[in-house]
Structure formats: C-alpha cells, structure tokens
Image (cartoon, rainbow, N blue to C red):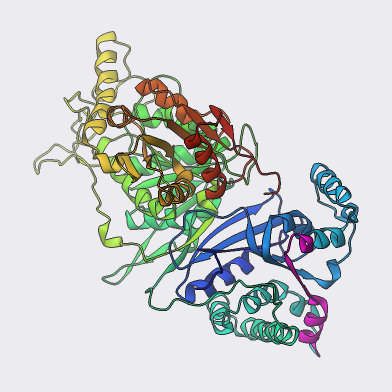
Amino acid sequence: MAVEGEASLAWRVGGPQGSGVDTAARLFSGACAAGGLHTFGRREYYSNIMGRHSYYDVRVSDRKMGCHRSLIHVLTTFGAETLVRHAISTVPGGIIIYNQGDADESLRSITFLEERLRDDLAAYLSERDLPVSTAGVLEDARRRDVVTFEVPYDDLTGTLAGSLVDKPRAARTLNTMAVAASCALIGYDRRYLIGALRKHFGDRPKIVDLNVRAVDLVYDYVQRQGIPDAFHYRLTPEPGNGPMLVVGGSDAAALGKIAAGMTFQTYYPISPATDESVYLESHSNIHLKGGGEAPIVIVQTEDELAAVTMASGAVIAGARAATATSGPGFSLMVEGLGWAGMNEVPLVITLYQRGGPSTGLPTRIEQGDLLPSIYAGHGDFPRLVVASGDVEDTFYDAAQVFNYAERYQTPVIHLLDQTLARTTQTLPPFDVGAIRIERGERYQPAPDVDPNAFYKRFEPTPSGITPRPFLGEPGGIHWLTGTEHTEYGQVTEDPVIREQQMEKRGRKLELAAREIPFEEKLHIHGDPNAEFTVVSWGSTKGAVVEALGGLLADGVAVRLIHVRLLWPFPAEELSELLRDARPLVVIEANYGGQFAHLLSGQTCYKPDHLVVKYNGRPLTCGELTRALQSIHQGDAPEHIVLRNPYE
C-alpha cells in the first residue's frame, strides 16, 4: 500500500440518512479487504430514520488498526451538508469529492445544519472574506492545499439511466458512484470494487449489473478528467494476507454467543443493542460441522422486564440464554436482575452503553453504565461485569461470559457500547475451536431417586455454589421466589438463615476473584516496566494502544493496563501494578470518571490525570497522543477534556 508519508489512509463518506451511506462504506471496506488490506470503520448517525446527516469513516492500512482518525485524506460527499460539515477535517494534500450541483449553496439553505455549527462556520468563513456558502467552504479548502474534485453525478446517473423506464433505479447508484470516484482517484483497481459489489448484491444480478455499469462510468470519467497532480495518496493491494472477515461489533457478539451454544435470546428493541438480535434472527438455524442444524430462538418481548424474566426462565429450564439491551432498557430490567441474583440464575445480560441520562444520545457513544452495571438493584447480590475492548475481544468475551455465569451461578453483565456496536474491522476468521463450553456444577439425579423428592437447591456450601438442577429433573424439586428463602427455596425471614444465604451468595464473588486468571482480568500493553501508566477499560482500548505506540516510537516508556473484569474488581492485581506508577492516568468516555472513582475506592490509588471525552463521539489516537504528550512534558492539567466540534 502506498500512502505518502502516512501509515494509513483515512476515508470518509457522508450523506442524508437513508441515502446508502452504510452500503457505500461496506463496498469500500469490502474492496479494500478483497485486496488484502486492513480496514477500521466507524459509523455516526442521528437518532432518526431518514434525512438527517450520516457519515462513515473507513481507515485503511497494510496492518491492523484500533481506531478511526479525526483528520481525513479523502472526503466523499453525497450532498452539501456533508461538504460543509467535514471539509475542515480534510488534511492538506487530501481531496474533497463533491457533486457539481453542490458547488454553490448557501449555508442557510441546508435544512438540518444545526444553528450552532452554522454560526461557527459562518464566522470562520467571514473572517477569511469568503462567502457563507459551499463555494466559500471549497475555496477555504483550496487555500489550505486541499484538492477539490467535482463530479457531475446527475449527468452520470442520467447517462446510466439511458432508455430505462425506471430512471429512479439508476439514481440509486449514487452511493456506488461516490465509492467508485474515490477508488479511481486513489488508483485502486476497479476489479476489487466490482468484486465487493458482486458479494454485496450477489443474489440480485440485475442490481449487480447496474452498479457495475455505474462503476465503469465513473472510472472512465475520472480517467478523462485526470487525477489532480496535487493529490498524491494512492492505495495498492497487499496480496497474501490470507482470508479476512469484515465484521462489526454487534455481529461479533452474536457470533460469540452462537459459538458458546446459546439457544435462546430475548430483547426489546432499543438502539444500539437491537442490531445484535436482528443478526441472530437472520441466522436462527446454525449449520453444524457434523451435519444438521441447531436452532436458536430469538423473542422480541413486550418490554424489558419481560425480556429479562423470560430469559431467566429459559436458563432455569437448562438453556444457555441471554438478553440484550441498552441503558434505559437495563434500568427497566433491574428488578428482574435482582430476582436472578436472589435465585442464583446464570443469566447473561449484554449491555450496550450509549449516551445518557434518560434517552440521552441514543445513537452516540458513552461509557456511562459502568457503575450502574455493578451496583444496580436494591440489596446486595453478586454479579460479574466484563467489558470488551475491541471487536475481536467481543467475540471471545461473548462466549466466555456464559462460562462465568454457569460456573458461578450468578448473572453476568457483558458491557459493550455504541463504539463497538458500530465499529467494523477486518480480522482473521475467529478461532471457534478455542471456545470451551463449561456448564458448571450440575445436579446429577441418582438412578433410584424419587422423582418427587425435594432438593436443597440453595444449600450453603464452602464455595457458595450448589449443583444446579434443570427444571423438571427428577428429584430436583425446589421453590423459586423473589423473597429470601431456605435451602429448599421456601420463603423465610429467619435471621440465621438470612445470614447463611447472604454469605452463600457472597462467597461466589470471592471465589471468582481467586479463580479467574490474571490474563482474563486485565492486559498490559506497551512497556510493562514503565512508570508512566495509563489505565482504561472498554472501547477506549484501540485508540489508547495506538497513541502509546506513537509515544513508544518516540522513546517514551509508557504502558497501558486495560481492565477487562470490572467486577469483582481486580484490586489486588492493580494495587501491585500501580505501586510505582508515576504519573497515573485514567482514560474513559464519560463525564464523571466512573472508572477513576471505582479505582480509587477499591485500591486507594487516585489518578494524577483524568482524560475524558463525553460529546458522544469515540476517542481518536491523535487527540490522545497530544494529551499524553502534554502529561509526559509536565504541563497538563489534572482533568483533560477531549473536544472536537466538527466530528
């Protein structure tokens, strides 16, 4: 791959929601992956169905990446709004590809442009004696040495339509044309894009043929116009990297659950969690290696309380079951979570965090549910909380949390977020053979057991774990109630039994803290002996790892401790690691520093610097590099807020 002076190419496409932005990004990513290149994509969109601005970043390299870039090399626009929003993010030497019809449009005429942004852009252009229009934005880009390339999309779609009666069908190839313009200008062989088209629309040959014709039209147009001399970025394939998947975070979670043998999932629709269940619904019959199929039952319930209790019922009956939700839905599930905790139900809850409070930012990122996931519910009951760091982790964690749930017979909350849900990445095929299914201590009825015998399901044991019967097994009769209970599950308020049952349940967390290996609790990246220590969790991982890579290359000794197991909190392991940490930096995507509070409360180590971002957009390695450099130089404040008004 050739990217002049860069290790990666940052490409952005945008347009009105519903105009095919997602498809454009999939085609571009698929074309790059077909050429053996690595991609990292992130999607940003408003919480409405049609019309508002949507955009997609795809970063391309010959090596694996962990985050997007806020500054881009290629901006491909579907309309005037994308042009004015993102032109300023295009680097000198980069290129803006725009529709001829958007060359001179007043900012005031762009319907969905927020007043704050419109005023900021108007002031920016006026200070430079430029018209407050797309023409002014384009001229400003040229002054900053950004190349602009005009494409007459209307004329091209008209040519494509030709004698077709259904001319709107030709107009729907606009997204393909935009991708084709990008690929042609960066010198990427059209056969990879055509291959991606065939894969994406494979079962619709007429659509494939129409889009291939659109690609040829645009490539021919770019060839006639010529690639501008000032634009030097090129993309060349890297054959020989082996097979790769282009996979998203919510898809990885679904695939991990399938690999773990999950057979039942409930959900009530809520962004961004819904995509996972929709993916499972479309793959509800799994083809087995040895032949045959295994069905998965996915149920859309009437509300979140029904979702969590129905999933608990499936677990009690012996299924590996889960429910998936986001912040507001999780709040409604808390009563059912407490019931599962009281009855030692190994239920998995996949919690996709998003901006809050209340409805908040339904389609934007926030790591705001860490403390609720640990403490939500009245009274004390054990649960495990695991947070994945990237798409690859998501697959393996989604499988492993079922083992935790059944081993310790307690609910497990798998924390994901909007960033992971909307991230797409090229990865080698997942190692399904590495997945081990551990169903925990099972009740085994004796051959001569009385089928009507009662079972001490909640008998106190030194570990806190009692062999678990499935519903209906002979000799396994017991009661299940939300009230405190005896070892048979019968309601009681006896103070001695209450103490026994509370202590029985509590011992599970102590056991988990002892048993779960160090490498499943946290990972260390960078220089393991460095004093300069960064601690983070969840989807910040990729951006932090890349930022550290830059610092290490500059000779700065620094390490990242990325925490995966959030509860029971690995206080002992972290206390040992943080003894010589100078400075200690915590990075997270929320306002209040939830992990920082947890860290100081559990270990008494207070971070020297807290770096946060809470505007609803993911962290980038560039902004983190600048923040960490200022900390290393000793001129940074204790509290650093990362801001970017143009993302």
Q: Position of residue 178 (x, y in %)?
A: 69, 72
Give 184 or 173, whichever is nearer the viewer: 184
Q: Position of residue 568 (x, y in %)?
A: 33, 30
- Kindly tell me whether residue 168 is visible in this rendering: yes
Is 284 located above or below residue 540 in the figure?
below
Q: Nearer the viewer, residue 599 or 163?
A: 599
- Residue drawn where x is 43% and y is 57% of the image: 252
- 131 to the left or right of 310: right
Asked if residue 52 can be seen in this view, the reply is no
Would you say residue 217 sits in the magenta stretch?
A: no
Give x and y (percent) for residue 283.
45, 63
Which of the 4 quarters of the picture holds residue 275? bottom right
Total numbered labels: 0
Q: Quadrant of residue 79?
A: bottom right
Position of 79 with respect to 522 (left or right) is right
Give coordinates of residue 53: x percent, y percent.
73, 55
Question: Which residue is nearer to you in this view: 12 or 327?
Answer: 12
Q: Residue furthest left?
A: 448
> Could you tell me which residue is drawn at 19 percent across and 39 percent down?
441
Residue 413 to residue 29: above or below: above
The residue sitting at the top extreme is 495
Name which residue lies at 56% across and 69% down: 4
Q: Which residues are magenta?
A: 141-162
User: Does residue 398 lie above or below 474 as drawn?
Assistant: below
Residue at screen point 69% across, 50% down? 46
- Left or right? Give the position of 225 relative to 469: right
